[in-house]
Image (tube, grey):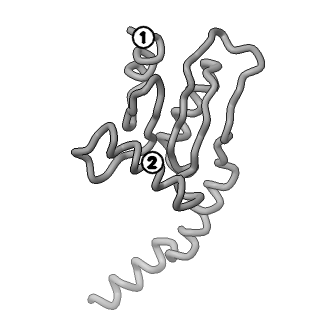
Amino acid sequence: MIQRCESHLQKKFMPPTIIFLLLALSFTGCQIESDYQPEQPDRNWPAVVVYGNPMCPHCRRLTEQLREHRIPYRFLDITADDATRMQLWQLVKKHHPELDRVSLPVVETKGQVLIRPSWSSFLQLLEGS
């Protein structure tokens, strides 16, 4: 009975290597611009630095929203090198010493550090409300 169930599962579901390849292919082309400067920004926005991972859906969504609203930003990929990861941790420990882990993206703007901010709270901070 157990052998029959296992062989049925193997036929019904994809092998792990195929799943991995499909996932890898789905993330190709998911690069996030490291520096985005709109040709004519709507206003003089403060500097925005986004720490994240190009594969992170929350990071991609935030950078897409920044581009849609023509807000310039700098994206630092924490998976690219150890120095960027260390820079992120120093920043987090300075502003949020109680944390021992963070969710991405982490945003630095106007002297504050936001960890996976909602779009509305981020805009409130930018606009000074």
Compare residues 44 and 116 and report the one nearer the observer: 44
Q: In this view, does 33 lie to the left or right of 10?
A: right
Q: Residue at x 59, y 40 (%)?
A: 75
State the CA–CA distance, disc 2 to disc 1: 24 Å
Asked which quadrant contains residue 35, the reply is top right
Residue 66: mark:
none
What is the crowding at mark 2: few (fewer than 14 residues within 10 Å), some, or many (at least 20)? many
* Percent position of residue 93, x then y: 32, 46
**Which mark sits nearer the N-terminus, 2 or 1?**
2
Compare residues 88 and 1 and report the one nearer the observer: 88
Q: In this view, does 18 lie above or below 105?
A: below
Q: In this view, does 39 lie above or below 36?
A: above
Amino acid type at mark 1: Gly
Asked which quadrant contains residue 64, the reply is top right
Asked which quadrant contains residue 117, the reply is top left
Residue identifier under label 2: 88
Q: Which residue is drawn at 27% across and 53% down?
A: 100
Compare residues 17 and 67 and report the one nearer the observer: 67
Residue 128: mark:
1
Q: Quadrant of the N terminus?
A: bottom left
Q: Is disc 1 placed on a helix, strand or loop?
A: loop
* Percent position of residue 7, x then y: 41, 85
Amino acid type at mark 2: Leu
* Percent position of residue 76, x then y: 57, 45
Q: Is disc 2 placed on a helix, strand or loop?
A: helix
Q: Is residue 112 above or below residue 40?
A: below
Q: In which quarter of the image is the C terminus?
A: top left
